[in-house]
Amino acid sequence: MASTANPVYGNYHGYYSKRPFVRDSRLSLLPPYFFAGKTVLDIGCNEGWVTCEIGQLWGAQGVLGVDIDDTLIRAAWKRRRSLWSQQSLGPRLLQDRDPSVVTSKRVKQHHDDDHDYFPASCEHSYGPLPIPSNRTGAAVFPHTVTFRTVDWLTEQDASDESRYDIVLAFSITKWIHLNHGDDGIRTFFQKIHRNLKPGGTLVMEPQAWETYSKAKRMDERLRDNAKHLQLRPDDFHRVLGDIGFGPPTHLGSVGEGGFRRPVDLYVKI
Ligand SMILES: C[S@@+](CC[C@H](N)C(=O)[O-])C[C@H]1O[C@@H](n2cnc3c(N)ncnc32)[C@H](O)[C@@H]1O
């Protein structure tokens, strides 16, 4: 889908200029090796900042970021290349010479590295460095990170079923709920459940009910849909339990101002 005039899907452009980070504070709630060696799906990845961080700094085996808005996905690919370009020499050599390095060591190396090898000023003047082909097929950034434009709720992709260790749903439940109603949010959670491996984890940052009123004012259709909503975000843990997730683990709330939201973890049982 091309960009909409109103961001009715929460498809804000420049989202991360309002919510900037070097390391995403929501991810910082998770244990250091949470993503190491894991396959991850980031639903509603926007411009791919979180997706790239998981692939570059957290040692994931593979991360797919999906978003409904094609312009955002193009920006996400650009960010991937730019981060690769500015990545310091250490991880590149590490990847090129020793792809078999144990995952936890690789995560530590990435966490310790500085990121000034090909500085942003050089990229500005000369463009980003080209990404070399992945000759060894090793699970290393940027090859671990891919993006896809898709309406993840309505478009079918059976190849994703039971494939992921971890699914991220950060700041997207409100948009699914307002656009597709109570049935839509149930379908969304069911699809996440199907896409996770047994024992896999959903990491979710739901928006509060109070924030729906501003969002729905953006569009007549959202206003109409909102009138029929019976479920509230506080009910989501019950819906997820009925679908086959264990009880939530509340990791905490981070973020500034209106972005201060809870992050919860659910395990597929
Ligand atoms: C408010 S942004 C959150 C971005 C990111 N997850 C974060 O928290 O940093 C919500 C994103 O979900 C995307 N989105 C909404 N509905 C979607 C759908 N059905 N399929 C895929 N992406 C969707 C929007 O385009 C938008 O980029």
Image: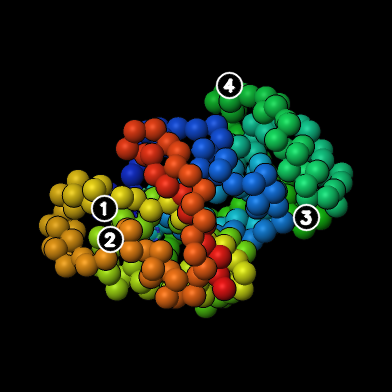
Residue tagged 1: 209
Query: Mark 1 or mark 2, which is nearer the start of the sequence?
Result: 1
Residue 227 in which image quadrant: bottom left
Q: Amino acid at mark 2?
A: Arg
N-term-proximal mark, 4 vs 3: 4
State yes or no: Cβ of the residue under disc 4 lies below 8 Å from any atom of ligand 1: no
User: Which mark sits nearer the N-terminus, 2 or 4?
Assistant: 4
Q: What amino acid is labelled 3 in the image? A: Ala
Q: Quadrant of the N terminus?
A: bottom left
CB within 8 Å, label 3 to label 1 = no
Tell me, yes or no, whether the two marked residues, 2 and 1, touch with CB atoms within 8 Å. yes
Q: Earlier in the sequence, mark 3 or mark 1?
A: 3
Dots 2, 3 in contact, CB < 8 A? no
Q: Secondary structure at mark 2?
A: loop
Q: Which numbered disc flags the more N-terminal residue, 4 or 1?
A: 4
Q: Residue furthest bottom?
A: 158
The quarter of the picture where residue 85 lies is top right
Residue at label 2?
232
Left/right of residue 135 with respect to residue 217 in the rendered view: right
Q: CA distance from mark 4 to mark 3?
A: 30 Å
User: Residue 2: image x %, image y %?
Assistant: 33, 55
Q: Which residue is mark 4?
A: 121
The mark nearer the N terminus, 2 or 3, is 3
Badge 2: few (under 14), some or many (20 or more) residues near its Cα, within 10 Å? few
Q: Secondary structure at mark 3?
A: loop
Secondary structure under tag 4 reads helix
Crowding around mark 4 (Cα neighbors within 10 Å: few <14, some 14 to 19, many 20+) is few
Give the residue at mark 3.
138
Give the label, 2 or 3, closer to the camera: 2
Q: Report the amino acid beneath label 1.
A: Trp
Distance between the Cα atoms at labels 2 and 1? 6 Å
Q: Does residue 266 appear in the picture of this structure?
A: yes
